[in-house]
Amino acid sequence: MTAPSIAVPSTAAKGAHIPLVGLGTWDLRGRECARLVDQAIGLGYRHFDTAQIYGNERELGEGVRASGIRREEVFVVTKVAPENLAPGPLARSVRDSIRNLRLGEIDLLLLHWPNKGVPLDETIAALCAAKREGLARHIGVSNYTVALLDEATRLAGDRLVCNQIEYHPYLDQSKVIAGTRRHGMAVVAYSPIARGGAKGDATLARIGSAHGKTAAQVSLRYLVQQDIAVIPRTSKVERLAENIALFDFALSDAEMQEIAGLAHPGGRIVDWAWSPKWD
């Protein structure tokens, strides 16, 4: 029996309405990616996240079109690769993304990672130009620290709507979340189940059992209850249905505090040689 479609609320920032649950597509390829996107739409997903470096923009677009949904009902995000942050490469790569997706303008265009080798003022100017030229409805950043956010918003004015960051119960991101919100921007969390690490957590499982939910659902609910959008990645249809079933229960203040206590200094999962100095 097909699971019923769930209506997902959104978080709002500067005119952008970002559904609180989306499908992250990192490492999804070919027909599998297109199939998962189509099936996700049937379950109620309206937020889809890809990136130039994922190599699956074309398949994401195929999945959206195969579903038969109206274009304006889905919120599609892609991210500019770090090597494309100079003005010329940024403009060319965004047009390539649009050709790959075949969905018209991008709903939210993000800078995937900072690049110390390209002056930030040039990158932000090119990002704002992409919005001004109608290539993207909204623009934002990803993996930006408080200092980078302050500089980027100084350069972009009031145009940036989002900072996409790693966030899950094992990582304290309170500083960058506060910095993001100080600029009126939304927070979107990638790896919100800690790449599966939350599924076997005894604390999350115990809290989940009180609500008839899994540990993974508690991890996700912990974030959306903070008005933070989540984009868990999965290749399993049953997990698609589980990851979106977050709006029929609520965590108590005591439960939220207990989950926050799971954060520890080694909790970060995604960290590369080119990463900024984290807050």
Image (cartoon, rainbow, N blue to C red):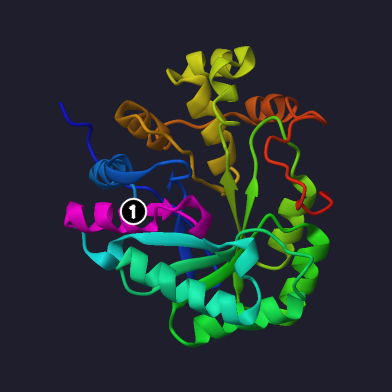
Q: Is residue 67 left or right of residue 232?
A: left
Q: Can the viewer see residue 44?
A: no
Q: Nearer the viewer, residue 130 or 181?
A: 130
- Vertical placement of residue 246 versus 187, above or below: above
Q: Is residue 59 magenta?
A: yes
Measured as percent of width and height from the top left, residue 209 is found at: 49, 13
Measured as percent of width and height from the top left, residue 101 is found at: 34, 64
- Vertical placement of residue 158 versus 193, above or below: below
Measured as percent of width and height from the top left, residue 41 is found at: 27, 47
Residues rendered magenta in the picture? 46-68
Secondary structure mostly seen in the magenta stretch: helix
Give the position of the N terminus as an image quadrant: top left
Q: Nearer the viewer, residue 73 or 132?
A: 132
Q: Secondary structure at mark 1?
A: helix
- Vertical placement of residue 235 versus 150, above or below: above
Q: Residues within 10 Å of mark 1 (few under 14, many from 20)?
A: many
Q: Is residue 144 left or right of residue 230?
A: right
Q: Residue at x 59, y 82 (%)?
A: 88
Q: Nearer the viewer, residue 9 or 88?
A: 88
Q: Nearer the viewer, residue 65 or 154?
A: 65
Occupied quadrant, residue 137: bottom left
Measured as percent of width and height from the top left, residue 129 is found at: 56, 85
Q: Residue at x 37, y 28 (%)?
A: 239
Q: Can the viewer see residue 116?
A: yes
Q: Is residue 124 magenta?
A: no
Residue linked to disc 1: 60
What's the amino acid at mark 1? Leu
Q: Residue at x 26, y 51 (%)?
A: 63
